[in-house]
Amino acid sequence: MRPLLTRRFFIPALAVGAVLMTPAAPAIAATCGSGTFEAWLADFKTEAAAKGISQTAIISGLNGVALDKGVLARDRSQAVFNQSFEQFSGRMVPPRLLRGSNMLKQYGSVLGRIEEAYGVPGEVIVAIWGLETDFGANTGKFPTIRSLATLAYDCRRADEFRAELMDALRIIERGDLAPVDMRGAWAGEIGQTQFMPSSYLKYAVDFDGNGRRDLLHSVPDVLASTANYFAGHGWQRGKGFEPGSPNFAVIQQWNKSEVYAKTIAYFANQLAKAP
């Protein structure tokens, strides 16, 4: 989710791949805010190795990472979102409706296969794609690893962001993205529909068949992974998504703001009516 209306909940970090026999994690994990950032980062590298992350992934992901005071400033100065549905949807949907309709046509075949696989209509997926990043045009420029390390070192939500940073290293280790390509929103969301690393690990799929789950560059992967997220949260195939319905509750798992969820549903319905 873009900082426009930041998704302030996090999915627990998940294990990936086969279960490996690894040394026990250190009794004391990297402690937020204690000592310098460099000392904290050294402790985190030790913790990552103990959790089975390879030295290759640790070095490529973390060497040279520095604290980003700009990220801390943004985290401390988030404005309260107080727009009404009418205000927010009126600002966000009309400028994106024509392009969204064109995207539905351009990727119609892919979206049809995605709906067959996951049960989520293309209009819903395209609506999210448009609202999150303008259909991939604005994925964010913040280095993901640096942002996550900064927020993990900070003590406001240290455990959540430490888990996300660990999962970002797992994304690197899995070969989905290179560290240099991992840029996104200031809070660590990445890709054309803005997944946190934990969600990336659990729900990203290789829909274009190239062997990587690439949510930055592969539109089929982006759209299918977003549908997989919805399916994984209980989306009911063939059912509506009006407010109060089970599928609307799934949309609110994407973003708990009722205004944002209603805007997704409204945008999707407008796309369904478009010529």
Image (spheres, helix red, strand yellow):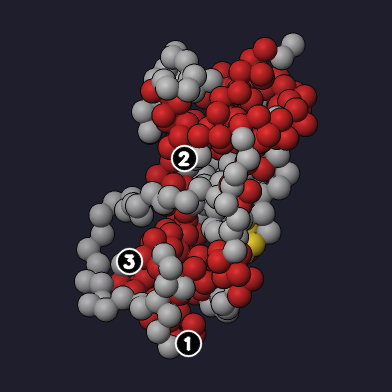
In this figure, which residue is indicated by the disc labeled 1?
36
Earlier sequence position, callout 1 versus callout 2 = 1
Placement of 45 over or under 75, stated as above or below: below
Q: CA distance from mark 3 to mark 1?
A: 25 Å
Residue 212 visible within the image: no
Placement of 1 over or under 26, stated as above or below: above
Q: Secondary structure at mark 3?
A: loop
Earlier sequence position, callout 3 versus callout 1 = 1
1 or 2: mark nearer the eye: 2
Q: Quadrant of residue 68?
A: bottom right
Which amino acid, by three-letter code, is at mark 1? Thr
Residue 118, horizontal then vertical, whole percent: 44, 24
Q: Quadrant of residue 233?
A: top left
Earlier sequence position, callout 2 versus callout 3 = 3
In this figure, which residue is indicated by the disc labeled 3?
52
Q: Nearer the viewer, residue 247 or 119?
A: 247
Q: Nearer the viewer, residue 218 or 183?
A: 183
Residue 246, horizontal then vertical, whole percent: 38, 23
Q: Secondary structure at mark 2?
A: loop
In this figure, which residue is indicated by the disc labeled 2?
256
Q: CA distance from mark 2 to mark 3?
A: 33 Å
